[in-house]
Image: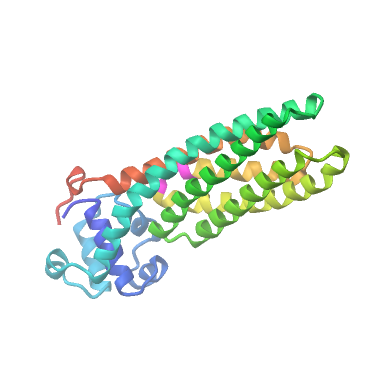
Amino acid sequence: MQQPELGRRLTALRKERNLTQEELVEKSNVSVRTIQRIEAGEVLPRISTVKILLKTLGESPETFLTKPTNMETKTEQLEHSGRSVLLTAVIAGAIYLAAEICLTAMDIAWLTKDRAWEQWINLVYIGLSIVMMASYILFARGFILLSKLFENKLLTLGAYLMMAAVVSVGILDSVTLFSDNTEQLWLPYSIAAIVSGTLTLVFGIALLRLQDGMGELARAAGILEILIGCMLLTVILFFIAYVIMIPAIIVEILVLYRGYEYLSKSPSQVALSV
């Protein structure tokens, strides 16, 4: 059998037995890192390692090679739909980044000039905000899918929290366009920065935990998100967060694309004989 097919079938068999990776580690005495990399299709395990895992899961090698597991069809369906979700998320991430850069530039102009725009500029800003919020939701859906593939529940939570944070800040930005007393805006924006910073830290930690499946790119994305969260929590250094956001989103787009490539792999791309 070949990779990534072996990893996918082992994952499906483990889930059919209602075992987590940690429980399989305890029963088989195979390291969690090894199991994670095998299931992710990253390594070519020894035949003896595969036999140990199959014995622990109560499956003979002969049966494993010929009989599809009950979970395998569900996994294949997830992978088929997952490719379109991840590709959409990659494109949405690029749109989100472009919209966020434009909105940040408009925010700077609003703060440094007369703060009284023409009505059509307000409409452009609101339109960009809607695009930004919608594209981020599609972008975050990609991480929700990766969380299912790599059993990272914290990432699911983090992605939903970030959706809520981005939408809330987008609404706040749009509403404040019509505020005459800009001096009172520091309070809602300070609260927004603290809340967003906290949620961003959760998302960053979840991305760090994704590195076992997605490698160093996920680790880099997690570190950048944690830095963003720390800057937002200080409130006064929020502007640094927007600078770090650009490379962070770029790296996250690359993480999603790597996930898309993983699901798009042909079983014949990586050879493994068992």
Percent across and percent down for residue 5 are 22, 55
Above or below residue 12? Residue 259 is above
Would residue 19 appear left or right of 216 to someone viewing this image?
Answer: left
The count of marks equals 0
Percent across and percent down for residue 11 are 30, 63
At 59% from the left edge and 42% from the top edge, which residue is drawn? 130
Q: Residue furthest top?
A: 113
Q: Quadrant of residue 87?
A: top left
Quadrant placement of the C terminus: bottom left
Percent across and percent down for residue 103 are 64, 33
Q: Is residue 218 visible?
A: yes
Extent of the magenta region: 214-218
Quadrant placement of the N terminus: bottom left
At 23% from the left edge and 62% from the top edge, which residue is drawn? 50
Q: Nearer the viewer, residue 51 or 69?
A: 69
Would residue 22 appear left or right of 196 to someone viewing this image?
Answer: left
Q: Nearer the viewer, residue 193 or 23?
A: 193
Task: Tell whether position 172 is magenta.
Answer: no
Q: Is residue 42 visible?
A: no
Would residue 273 appear left or right of 231 to someone viewing this image?
Answer: left
Percent across and percent down for residue 113 are 79, 24
Dominant secondary structure, magenta: helix
At 55% from the left edge and 40% from the top edge, which residue is drawn? 131
Q: Nearer the viewer, residue 256 or 150?
A: 256
Would residue 104 appear left or right of 92 to someone viewing this image?
Answer: right
